[in-house]
Image (tube, coloured by chain):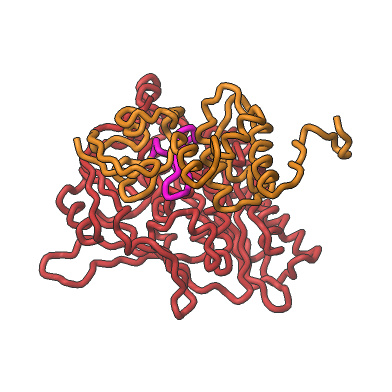
Amino acid sequence: MLRLPKFELEEPATLDEALALFAEHGSDAMPIAGGTDLVPNMKHRLFEPKVVVSLARIEALTGIRVTSGGELEIGAMTTLADVARSSAVQERAPVLAQAASLIAGPQLRTMGTLGGNVMLDTRCQWYNQTHFWRTSLGYCLKKDGTECHVVQGGGKCVAAASNDTAPALMTLGATLVFQGPTPPGESKANLREIAIDALWKADGIVNKHTEPGEILTAIRIPAQAAGHRGAYGKLRDRGSIDFPLFGCAVRLDVGTDEAVTGADICAVALVARPSHVKRIEDELVGQRVGSDDFASAVGRVAELAYKQCRPMDNSPGDADYRREMVPVYVRRTLHAAAQGAGPVHHV
Amino acid sequence: MRVFRLNVNGDDLEVAAPAHWTLLEVLRYELGLIGSKQGCDKGDCGACTVLLDGSPVLSCLRLAATAEGHAVVTIEGLMPMHKARGGDGADVVQDAFDRCGALQCGFCQPGMMLSARALLNENPKPTRGEIHDALAGNLCRCTGYTQIVQAVELCVAEAAGVEPAQPAWSADANGKKV
């Protein structure tokens, strides 16, 4: 039995009330969205906030809408199940719908939110354990200890970013809207919109640049190219549930002549931040999808990914096996995107 | 302590419990509804599955306070709600699990049956693949999945008045009965 540590629960009905609570309690307070990551982490004593602020009653944070400019705007508290089955998301950002559909199992997708998945804590097999387990180990660099058990003698935490939606949103060029406390004397909402690529830093302890007291309120996805195609591939222990051992999101822009005009691949669950696979457009742009030249370009891209992606011993899966799976999943996911299919995963 | 106003199995209840308790803790230790099981207690196993406004959620990860204002259904509610709808005896899902022997130790059953109930409410004619997807968040460590899937297929077939599909193990790769 795992009991939660004691905390005070606040349930504000508006964003302003929530921001006031964070301003009042500072670092003693933590926001809870779906709770599917924070609750187990609190049960493991990885977080012991004095005040937990539930965002569940703030209606303004939920919903998916398409703006007049063709942009998708998704409230941070929209559940992953709603993102996965939304026809607007499936049409305009298939890679995001696929990534959301592969997160955990049905119950967790009903509870978990898109904002919560973007802001997910990094994971490591030496960290996501009970307090008893971690005490026996002597703790680790990320929490309560001074030693890294992944990199012997390492001084930097390498816990893995494990959020499936993050690479999907990166290939789509999404932006994140944060709202912070309104400074005294001001009446305008204190909004900050950043590209999702600018959120990350390569530090497993906290892998995001955020300002104190701010809340992620919405995710904006710009209108994609006319021939936009996307797919998500996910390697995991059990196809029914589980965090990724490796995940890759693919964007392919295809012209009317079926030739690739733009491409992006983003990988996750390797190191502390999701990252783009570099120099892939040099290989793919100009190739007609479905042709032999396209297939050989996909092979070269898979090699590039193999060279650039180095999984560490931070998740339960064997790091060497995960690395060998990188080109396999990149190749299959690229072909799935080209065919307008996906997601790519095993059962 | 705080007072939670919960709607459980159709009853409006007021129950006092520590403010940080999960829905599962309130159900089991304050309301005595021990049908929802405390398995891994961290969202892996699905034994604590309850329906919240008809959708399966994990009560071990849901703070009791955030269940206020929603209709909670536990395994204890399936049969009374089936009768309230004019049904006879147990819910058809429970009846099918019983007839198919879809249990060994039984620990995963309440969660399995609620996930199956939610699936059938939303999609009365699921395919075998859709059944697998809907039950993906419920682990059976006796690994008795075959009879569980068969039980859900039995519900579907009987509702449609057709012969239930044979389980995968009853034929070889060429479709010949074994």
Number of labelled discs?
0
Q: Residue at x 31, y 40 (%)?
A: B64
Percent coordinates x, y for residue A136 in the rendering: 38, 19
Residue A221 forms part of the magenta stretch: no
The residue at the far left in this view is A185
Q: In which quarter of the image is the C terminus of chain A?
A: top right
The residue at the far top in this view is A136
Chain painted orange: B
The answer to whether one can see residue A327 in this image is: no
| In this rendering, position of residue B74 left or right of residue A301 | left
Percent coordinates x, y for residue A76 in the rendering: 38, 59
> Eyeballing the image, is A187 above or below A51?
below
| In this rendering, position of residue A209 left or right of residue B156 | left
The colour of chain A is red
The residue segment tinted magenta is B44-61
Q: Residue at x 68, y 44 (%)?
A: B158
Residue B56 forms part of the magenta stretch: yes
Percent coordinates x, y for residue A199 in the rendering: 39, 57
Q: Quadrant of the N terminus of chain A?
A: top left
| In this rendering, position of residue A163 left or right of residue A61 | right
